[in-house]
């Protein structure tokens, strides 16, 4: 079933000025994308997620600036997120602000998901694209991490960190460039993108928060029409990527997160002509392709990330999806050959 995954323009409004500073017009950047150049001047505008990936890829090629996503993101913080950004600014603590954001992030994007999971003595605030891998995705990961770092510090101060930033690709600049730009240690070639936050940071207060305004904004969001693809299987996809990364992507888990019975989940998916198993495999395949394309992780590490018992089990699954091995698919991705 085709879907029109939408992305709110907010965090990307800096793109026109940046590309023009490199002597390139926005008309040239958006050519063939189906998006008008003027769309990037409207914070509340929306565009297909896949088309935005392609616009970012074309912008890199025409400007020659490999770290364009990072540059755009460094100019933004939570205020680029519209009503959701206003909501998080009125939470009492950083932890509650992040929880508000994770619950409402789908109101800004239907092509990627934000998730919070325990990690060691702290937490990882992650971001993941869950649809089919597209060129330009690495730029959106850089943009998202930069916006998140700025948002954390804007809300709770420099004491909030992050401890480090995980980048789920090889890097569009040397690691030292990322560390200078983001002001913290950075690890490239990671299985997912995330900010590492301490438990202490999550308890930091947000100055100027207003509980009544927070309640008003939360109610306003609850009453707002669905954003992007409101069909039920889109909601399931939105939850599956973090569930797969956390190693618990069962239908029972997803049904529980949505707040419905397993039979209801299966019935609603059937009504839309899909099955849970089919969606779960599509998202798992998308993650595999992304990691094979964007990182230098060993196939064994990717297999472990996807919770396969052995690399051979992952190899068999990948051959069912594509007819070829993960290693051969990766070589084709690197060379640009048809796969």
Image (cartoon, rainbow, N blue to C red):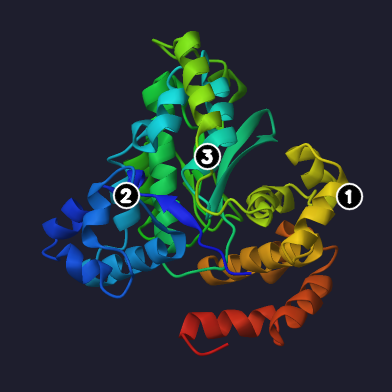
Q: Identify the residue position indicated by label 1 in the image.
A: 263
- Crowd class of label 1 (few under 14; some 14 to 19; many from 20; radius 10 Å): few
Q: Disc 2 or 1, which lies upstream in sequence?
A: 2
The quarter of the displayed image where residue 280 is located: bottom right
Q: Position of residue 209 (x, y in %)?
A: 44, 12
Q: Disc 1 or 3, which lies upstream in sequence?
A: 3
Residue displayed at 52% across by 23% down: 218
Residue displayed at 62% across by 66% down: 286
Q: Is residue 250 visible?
A: no
Pick whichever, 145 or 43, lies toward us. Answer: 43
From the viewer's perspective, is residue 14 above or below residue 20? above
Q: Position of residue 177 (x, y in %)?
A: 33, 50
Q: Is residue 262 shown left or right of residue 48?
A: right
Labelled disc at residue 105:
3
- Crowd class of label 3 (few under 14; some 14 to 19; many from 20; radius 10 Å): some
Residue displayed at 78% across by 50% down: 247
Residue displayed at 20% across by 55% down: 16
Q: Is residue 158 shown left or right of residue 249?
A: left
* Secondary structure category for the residue under label 2: helix
Mark 1–mark 3 CB contact (< 8 Å): no
Q: Position of residue 250 (x, y in %)?
A: 83, 52
- What is the distance, in whole Å, between disc 1 and disc 3 at their CAs? 27 Å
- What is the distance, in whole Å, between disc 2 and disc 3 at their CAs? 16 Å
Q: Disc 2 or 3, which lies upstream in sequence?
A: 2
* Secondary structure category for the residue under label 1: helix
Q: Quadrant of the N terminus?
A: bottom right
Mark 2–mark 1 CB contact (< 8 Å): no
Q: Is residue 276 shown left or right of residue 219?
A: right
Q: Position of residue 265 (x, y in %)?
A: 81, 50
Pick whichever, 288 or 260, lies toward us. Answer: 260
Labelled disc at residue 12:
2
Q: Is residue 201 visible?
A: yes
């Amino acid at each position: 079933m085709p879907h029109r995954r939408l992305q709110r323009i907010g965090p990307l409004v800096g793109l026109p000025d940046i590309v023009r500073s490199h002597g390139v017009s926005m008309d040239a950047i958006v050519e063939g994308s189906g998006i008008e150049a003027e769309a990037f001047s409207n914070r509340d505008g929306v565009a297909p997620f896949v088309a935005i990936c392609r616009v970012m890829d074309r912008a890199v090629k025409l400007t020659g600036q490999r770290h364009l996503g990072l540059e755009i993101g460094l100019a933004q913080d939570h205020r680029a997120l519209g009503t959701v950004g206003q909501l998080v600014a009125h939470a009492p603590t950083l932890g509650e602000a992040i929880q508000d954001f994770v619950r409402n992030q789908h109101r800004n994007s239907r092509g990627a998901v934000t998730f919070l999971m325990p990690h060691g003595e702290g937490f990882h605030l992650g971001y993941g694209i869950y649809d089919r891998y597209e060129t330009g995705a690495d730029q959106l990961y850089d943009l998202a991490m930069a916006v998140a770092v700025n948002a954390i510090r804007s809300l709770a101060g420099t004491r909030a960190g992050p401890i480090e930033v995980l980048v789920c690709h090889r890097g569009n600049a040397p690691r030292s460039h990322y560390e200078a730009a983001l002001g913290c240690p950075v690890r490239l070639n990671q299985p997912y993108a995330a900010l590492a936050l301490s438990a202490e940071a999550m308890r930091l207060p947000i100055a100027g928060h207003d509980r009544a305004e927070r309640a008003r904004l939360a109610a306003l969001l609850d009453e707002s029409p669905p954003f992007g693809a409101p069909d039920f299987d889109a909601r399931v996809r939105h939850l599956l990527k973090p569930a797969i990364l956390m190693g618990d992507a069962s239908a029972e888990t997803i049904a529980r997160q949505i707040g419905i019975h397993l039979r209801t989940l299966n019935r609603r998916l059937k009504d839309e002509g899909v099955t849970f198993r089919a969606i779960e495999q599509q998202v798992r395949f998308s993650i595999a392709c992304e990691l094979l394309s964007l990182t230098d992780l060993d196939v064994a590490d990717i297999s472990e990330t996807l919770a396969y018992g052995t690399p051979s089990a992952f190899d068999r699954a990948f051959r069912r999806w594509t007819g070829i091995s993960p290693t051969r698919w990766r070589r084709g991705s690197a060379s640009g050959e048809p796969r």
